[in-house]
Amino acid sequence: MDLDDLSEAIGIELETDEYDFETLGGLILHLAGDIPSPGDEVEHEGLLFRVEGVEDNRILGVRVERLPEPETPEA
C-alpha cells in the first residue's frame, strides 16, 4: 500500500520524506531492519504495525493500530 493512501485512510500524515520508500512494506522493512515474520510489530509516529502475513519476502498483510497517547504527569 502506498504511504500517501495509508495516511489518507487513517487520517494521519506520516513523515517519510527523508526515506527512499513509498510503501507500507518499505516502511516496515526499514523499521524492522530485516524481513519480518508474521506477528512481528514495529512502532512509528504513534502507530503500531503488526505483520499479519509474509510470503517470499513480501509483506502481505499488516494490522495498523493507533497507540494511546502517553499520559503526562500532572504538576
Image (cartoon, rainbow, N blue to C red):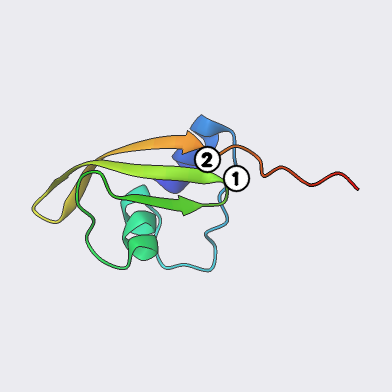
* Disc ID at residue 13: 1
Is label 1 in contact with label 2 (beta carbons under 8 Å)?
A: yes
Mark 1 secondary-structure assignment: loop
- Residue 15 vs residue 70, the one in the foreground: 70
- Residue 3 vs residue 44, the one in the foreground: 44
Q: Position of residue 3 (x, y in %)?
A: 44, 47
Tell me the CA gap for discs 1 and 2.
Answer: 5 Å
Q: Residue at x 53, y 68 (%)?
A: 18
Work out whether 18 lies above or below 29: below
User: Circle 2: is it few (<14), some (14-19), or many (20+) Cα within 10 Å?
Assistant: few
Number of marks in picture: 2
Question: What's the residue type where badge 2 is placed?
Answer: Ser
| Residue at numbered disc 2 | 7
User: Circle 1: is it few (<14), some (14-19), or many (20+) Cα within 10 Å?
Assistant: few
Residue 21 falls in image quadrant: bottom left
- Residue 11 vs residue 46, the one in the foreground: 46
